[in-house]
């Protein structure tokens, strides 16, 4: 077994015998040729792991040979080895997707480094990643044990997401290490839920105060616009507020890689209010009010759980109420993009809204995907695990109007704020609950009278007024699932559990649902002009 099969094409190959022997001693099988025609013939008969190609050969040039090799073996990495340092040749080689560019004279270790980078990178990365996580495992565990405040939990969640993304890139994503990380995450969520239960009511007391936010609590949903939007407008900037429904921090980290060369990124995380559901959290963002405040001050804009009307149809007037309540004069537009048709309409009116102080755009795709995964076997198969779920999200981004919007904004003078109303969690632990006929259908929280449940490991709010939630009846309770729990009714229990187990849900208490991105982007216009 060799480390790889190499083809080396160079008209001076006889002078490179020492290099060839060095590679052979390192475990590589090396086939040598002295011209482009022979190189192409070899590629037509054998599959190589990598090709070393001289740029200056008689007959077919290196660039011509490269093009023909790529037509025969498009997957093979080609390393250009040349005496030329001309920029035009470098550009042409790079334009033809070479794997590396080495300037003669090359030493054997340069070549070895290129081989490791282009043949063995995945294996090396996997080995180093696994080793690094093993070394950091205890550090993460200690951080979970030592977390005492809201910022500590943000740091814990960042660490867990970092390693989840790193380990999911391994050739076998179902490694024992990933299983260990999942267990750490579950443990962290149990402790995080205890932290929320202990501190949430205090935060709600403080948010009612006219005093500035203390360091004792995080930024909450009601403060998103006051914290991240209005200050930029006050500084004379125009703002695009992009709200991705049900957008988790791990999904944002992947999106950041896609747009990182277009923008300077200022990333922070904030906490969603409870329930972590659109009706509550997103309406709180746009209104700057807690749900009970919306219901009291603007009853025509609040829709109770038991009403059939859509729960997020009044977002534009809610934005207006917040602007007016702060006695601001900001001009704004509001757009909700649910499908390609609404996306096209938005792009068509883009020039009309550019002079607005604030443009709010809501994207519903991720939330739609999460619900479709529950209801469709095909979608569930396509997004069978966390990695696949993230992959579909990124595929949508790359091929949707979202990328076009970011590209346009990258050459503008706008300040862009990217956020969400809540995240979601993959649930697999059913919890029995009994409710009346009109109890809400959400799997992560329940609101109603005479709810029957075991209060252990649940967050029960018996007085909704304490946490600024509407109270339709005196006996109304709110009950929240924690970690990976989901509520199931005793009637037809097994079917219900089988149907909803392993689906992505939101509304309850977990780091994934509550700790969410609030990101400010500044265009790097010089990169695109």
Image (spheres, rainbow, N blue to C red):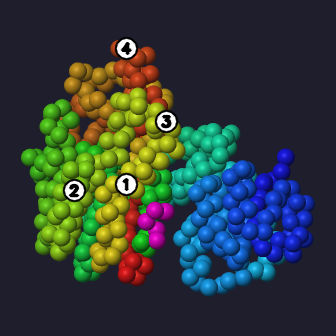
Determine crowd level at label 4: few under 14, some 14-19, many 20+ residues with C-alpha closer than 10 A. Answer: few
Q: Nearer the viewer, residue 24 or 503?
A: 24
State the CA–CA distance, disc 2 to disc 1.
13 Å
Q: Secondary structure at mark 1?
A: loop
Is disc 3 in contact with disc 2, using a CB cutoff of under 8 Å?
Answer: no
Q: Secondary structure at mark 4?
A: loop
Residue 453 location (% of width, % of height): 38, 24
Q: Which residue is mark 4?
A: 492
State the CA–CA distance, disc 1 to disc 4.
41 Å
Q: Which residue is mark 1?
A: 399
Q: Residue at x 38, y 50 (%)?
A: 396
What is the quadrant of residue 329 in the picture? bottom left
Q: Which residue is mark 3?
A: 384
Q: Residue at x 83, y 71 (%)?
A: 13
Q: Is residue 277 above or below residue 485?
A: below
User: Along the horizontal axis of the image, is 373 left or right of 457?
Assistant: left
Looking at the rendering, the stretch of residues picked out in magenta corresponds to 257-261
| Residue 344 numbered tag | 2
State the CA–CA distance, disc 1 to disc 3.
21 Å
């Amino acid at each position: 077994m060799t480390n790889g099969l190499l083809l080396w094409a160079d008209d001076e190959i006889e002078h490179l015998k020492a290099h060839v022997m060095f590679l052979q001693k390192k475990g590589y099988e090396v086939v040598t040729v002295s011209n482009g025609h022979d190189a192409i013939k070899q590629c037509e008969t054998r599959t190589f792991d990598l090709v070393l190609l001289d740029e200056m050969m008689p007959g077919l040039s290196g660039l011509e040979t490269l093009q023909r090799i790529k037509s025969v073996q498009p997957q093979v990495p080609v390393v250009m080895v040349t005496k030329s340092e001309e920029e035009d040749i470098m550009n042409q080689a790079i334009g033809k997707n070479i794997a590396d560019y080495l300037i003669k004279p090359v030493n054997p270790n340069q070549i070895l480094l290129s081989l490791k980078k282009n043949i063995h990178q995945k294996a090396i990365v996997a080995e180093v990643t696994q080793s690094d996580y093993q070394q950091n495992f205890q550090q993460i565990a200690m951080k979970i044990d030592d977390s005492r405040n809201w910022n500590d939990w943000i740091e814990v969640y960042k660490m867990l997401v970092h390693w989840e993304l790193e380990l999911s890139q391994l050739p076998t994503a179902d490694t024992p290490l990933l299983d260990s990380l999942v267990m750490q995450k579950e443990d962290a969520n149990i402790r995080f839920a205890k932290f929320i239960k202990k501190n949430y009511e205090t935060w709600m007391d403080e948010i009612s105060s006219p005093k500035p936010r203390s360091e004792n609590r995080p930024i909450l949903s009601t403060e998103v616009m006051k914290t991240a939007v209005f200050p930029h407008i006050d500084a004379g900037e125009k703002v695009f507020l992009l709200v991705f429904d049900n957008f988790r921090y791990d999904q944002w980290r992947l999106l950041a890689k896609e747009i990182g060369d277009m923008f300077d990124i200022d990333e922070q995380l904030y906490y969603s209010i409870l329930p972590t559901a659109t009706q509550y959290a997103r309406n709180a963002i746009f209104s700057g009010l807690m749900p009970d405040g919306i219901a009291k001050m603007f009853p025509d804009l609040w829709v109770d759980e038991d009403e059939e009307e859509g729960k997020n149809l009044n977002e534009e007037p809610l934005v207006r109420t917040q602007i007016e309540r702060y006695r601001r004069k900001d001009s704004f537009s509001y757009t909700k993009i649910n499908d390609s048709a609404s996306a096209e309409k938005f792009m068509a009116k883009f020039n009309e809204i550019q002079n607005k102080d604030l443009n709010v755009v809501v994207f519903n795709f991720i939330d739609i995907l999460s619900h479709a995964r529950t209801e469709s076997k095909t979608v569930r198969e396509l997004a069978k695990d966390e990695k696949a779920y993230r992959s579909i999200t990124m595929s949508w981004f790359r091929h949707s109007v979202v990328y076009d919007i970011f590209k346009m904004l990258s050459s503008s003078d706008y300040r862009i704020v990217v956020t969400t109303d809540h995240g979601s969690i993959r649930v697999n632990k059913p919890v029995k609950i009994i409710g009346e006929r009109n109890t809400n259908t959400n799997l992560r929280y329940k609101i109603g009278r005479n709810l029957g449940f075991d209060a252990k490991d649940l967050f029960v709010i018996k007085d909704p007024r304490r946490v600024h939630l509407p109270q339709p009846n005196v006996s109304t309770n709110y009950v929240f699932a924690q970690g990976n729990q989901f509520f199931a009714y005793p009637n037809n229990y097994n079917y219900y559990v089988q149907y909803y187990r392993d689906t992505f849900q939101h509304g309850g208490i977990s780091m994934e649902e509550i700790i969410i991105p609030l990101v400010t982007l500044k265009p790097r216009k010089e990169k695109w002009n």
